[in-house]
């Protein structure tokens, strides 16, 4: 049995995990930077990189301790090297290369987006491929045809804001703080999702598997403040704010659900795997479950611990390890992939 140590630093979560070549996760540790970025209303790349530098080795040590192993027990190092914030990724890649070289073990580079889909396979405990994959997070909203764990072709992505980014921006408009997703979901629970008829881009076009949330964000802004937003203040707590949150959330959920249905019909694949931080949203999970039930399709969504950024989902490295697809010693950070 081979033990893997995996690192994740693609954005603002410093994470490490230990797992085996049988996909048994022995530990998964995540150090959040939310408090560092909250006052800025979003992730500041340089602050994220510096926090990774401080947090990474304590997180690795905690992951090893929880797994009950030492560095000498590690037979392979895995790291997410794409996509993400280049400075943040470099922290993880640099540490991974140093560890692999020092231990004399293979290094495996893993795609962060592909790992989000692989988290569904880990949670299912069985093969889920081929399937349609939806990765929906603060940085990505994209549909893929996933023929295998390592073979994913893009069906369509967002033309502007990612869904998670839209959640954060609308939460800022409503004065709900950062990160916006959980706060907006809580606020929406008290509102009427039909109070505002917000736009749902591209839903009528089943030939275009693309997303756009910028217009929806602007519609919320105008509904909140009118046309003159130069001196606008967030609305006070109450029905108005709750209705805006609920109507916005309903629009995002509708768009994501409809485009997933269209993707499954277009590809003929009756399986949908959903990953990324926004997949933790309860109304979205319920909507996708209802849609898949009507379509006679299987739905795979990982538990909340595997939805947001983590290193355990880098167990995708096991698939590369079986094929001896090891990374070179000069592995670099690749901020862009799709």
Image (cartoon, rainbow, N blue to C red):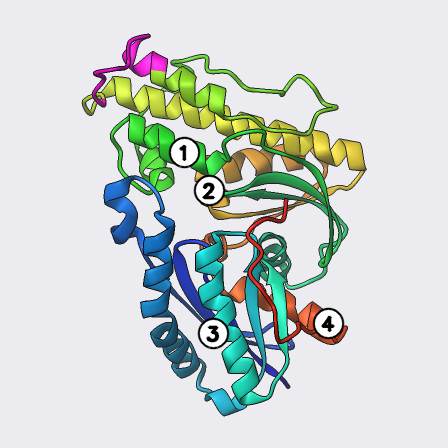
Report the Cα–Cα distance between label 3 and label 4: 19 Å
**Residue situated furthest bottom in the rendering:** 72
Chain part drawn in magenta: 222-234
Q: Helix or strand or loop: what does disc 3 sit on?
A: helix
Q: Give the vertical position of 105 relative to 51 (above or below).
A: below
For mark 3, what is the residue? 95
For residue 193, side relative to residue 203 (left or right) = left
Q: Earlier in the sequence, mark 2 or mark 1?
A: 2
Percent position (x, y) of residue 120? 60, 55
30 versus 98 height, above or below? above
Residue designated by label 4:
325
Q: Give the residue at mark 2.
A: 138
- Residue 189 visible? The answer is no
Q: Earlier in the sequence, mark 1 or mark 3?
A: 3
For the point 55% across and 52% down, the residue is 335
Horizontally, is 110 left or right of 264 in the view?
left
Secondary structure, magenta segment, majority class: loop
- In three-dimensional space, the C-alpha distance between marks 4 and 1, rounded to whole angstroms, equals 37 Å
Residue 232 belongs to the span the image colors magenta: yes
């Amino acid at each position: 049995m081979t033990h893997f140590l995996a690192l994740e630093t693609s954005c603002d979560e410093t994470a490490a995990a230990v797992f085996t070549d049988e996909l048994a996760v022995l530990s998964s540790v995540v150090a959040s930077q939310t408090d560092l970025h909250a006052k800025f209303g979003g992730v500041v790349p340089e602050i994220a990189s510096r926090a990774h530098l401080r947090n990474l080795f304590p997180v690795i040590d905690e992951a090893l301790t929880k797994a009950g192993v030492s560095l000498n027990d590690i037979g392979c190092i895995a790291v997410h090297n794409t996509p993400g914030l280049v400075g943040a990724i470099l922290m993880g890649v640099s540490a991974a290369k140093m560890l692999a070289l020092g231990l004399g073990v293979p290094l495996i580079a893993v795609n962060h987006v592909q790992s989000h889909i692989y988290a569904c396979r880990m949670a299912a405990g069985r093969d889920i491929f081929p399937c349609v994959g939806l990765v929906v997070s603060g940085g990505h909203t994209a549909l893929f045809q996933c023929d295998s764990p390592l073979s994913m072709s893009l069906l369509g992505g967002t033309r502007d804001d990612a869904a998670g980014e839209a959640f954060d921006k609308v939460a800022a408009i409503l004065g709900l703080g950062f990160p916006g997703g959980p706060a907006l979901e809580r606020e929406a629970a008290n509102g009427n999702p039909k109070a505002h008829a917000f736009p749902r881009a591209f839903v009528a076009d089943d030939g275009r598997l693309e997303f756009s949330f910028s217009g929806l964000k602007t519609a919320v802004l105008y509904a909140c403040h009118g046309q003159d937003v130069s001196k606008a203040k967030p609305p006070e707590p109450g029905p108005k704010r709750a209705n805006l949150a609920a109507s916005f959330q309903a629009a995002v959920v509708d768009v994501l659900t409809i485009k997933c249905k269209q993707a499954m019909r277009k590809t003929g694949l009756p399986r949908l795997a959903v990953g990324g931080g926004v997949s933790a949203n309860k109304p979205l999970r319920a909507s996708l479950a209802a849609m898949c039930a009507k379509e006679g399709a299987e739905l795979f969504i990982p538990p909340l611990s595997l939805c947001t950024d983590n290193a355990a989902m880098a167990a995708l490295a096991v698939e590369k390890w079986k094929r001896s697809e090891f990374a070179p010693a000069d592995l670099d950070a690749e901020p862009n992939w799709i």
